[in-house]
Image (cartoon, rainbow, N blue to C red):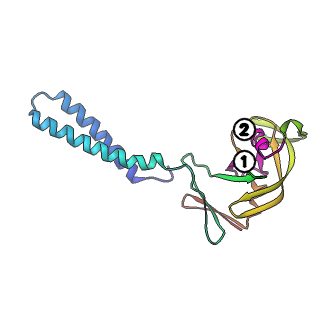
Amino acid sequence: MADFDTSRLIYLIVLLVMVAGWFLMQTREGLNKTLQHAAVWAMIFVGGAAAVGLWQDISRPASQTRMTDAGQIIVPRSADGHYYLTVQINGADVRFVLDTGATDMVLTQSDARRAGLDPDQLTYLGRANTANGEVRTAFVRLDAVQLGDVTDRDVAAVVNGGQMEDSLLGMGYLQRWGRLEIANGELILTR
């Protein structure tokens, strides 16, 4: 809970009060019906307001990566705490999770296929230690890697021979950027 959001807490408290109030109204026998109806309508109104407030959080896109006029790439932290980027590899959009603990840019087999590589024809001579154990890797060279307005050519990467959910944007690519900064829930890449 590094980013404590007071407005979310208030919405949750209001919802809890609504449910508790409804339960109280249903179990009390001596209240005037008009007072009961007024309380029910007040709870409906408050519940609607809380739902509208939460809807903005629910419907917000997971990632709104943007590029500034100064050439910086700004990546907001997603709800799961990771930073995700869509990078064009050989003209194909590939979704990466930024991983400063990864040495290389690592492509899943399906992302390698999308980028025009045939994982079945690669030679998996490398080995990498991951959280899931050791996996075999194949070294590749990517013709073009484009992030925002920046295109890099002849970029080294590896294709993972095992199962992986997302491709990893590791330090092999990130070091091409002059500066990498994490502040206020955003990752900023500057070239």
Cβ–Cβ under 8 Å for marks 2 and 1:
yes
User: In the rendered image, which residue does mark 1 sit on?
Assistant: 168
Foreground residue, 66 or 136? 66
User: Is 56 on the left or on the right of 98, as rendered?
Assistant: left
Residue under the image location 81 percent in, 43 percent down: 159
What residue do we see at 58% from left, 49% from top? 81
Amino acid marked by disc 1: Leu
Residue type, mark 2 in image: Met
Residue 164's disc number: 2
Q: Position of residue 179 (x, y in %)?
A: 70, 66
Q: Secondary structure at mark 2?
A: loop
Image position of 52 (left or right of 177): left
- SS at mark 1 in the image: strand
| Relative to 30, 114 lies left or right | right
Q: CA distance from mark 2 to mark 1?
A: 9 Å
Magenta stretch: residue 179 in it? no
- Quadrant showing the C terminus: bottom right
Mark seen at residue 84: none
- What is the span of residues highlighted in magenta in the rendered image? 92-117
Q: Is residue 93 magenta?
A: yes
| Residue 27 drawn at (x, y percent) | 19, 27
Q: Locate residue 66 relative to residue 6 in the image: left or right.
A: right
* Residue 49 vertical placement versus 189 (above, below): above
Label 1 Cα crowd, 10 Å radius (few <14 / some 14-19 / many 20+) = many
Q: Position of residue 6 (x, y in %)?
A: 39, 53
Q: In this figure, what is the number of numbered marks?
A: 2
How dense is the environment of label 2, judged by Cα within 10 Å: few (below 14), some, or many (20 and up)? some
To which quarter of the image does residue 33 belong?
top left
Residue at the far bottom in the pictured view: 70
* x then y, percent, for residue 78: 56, 50
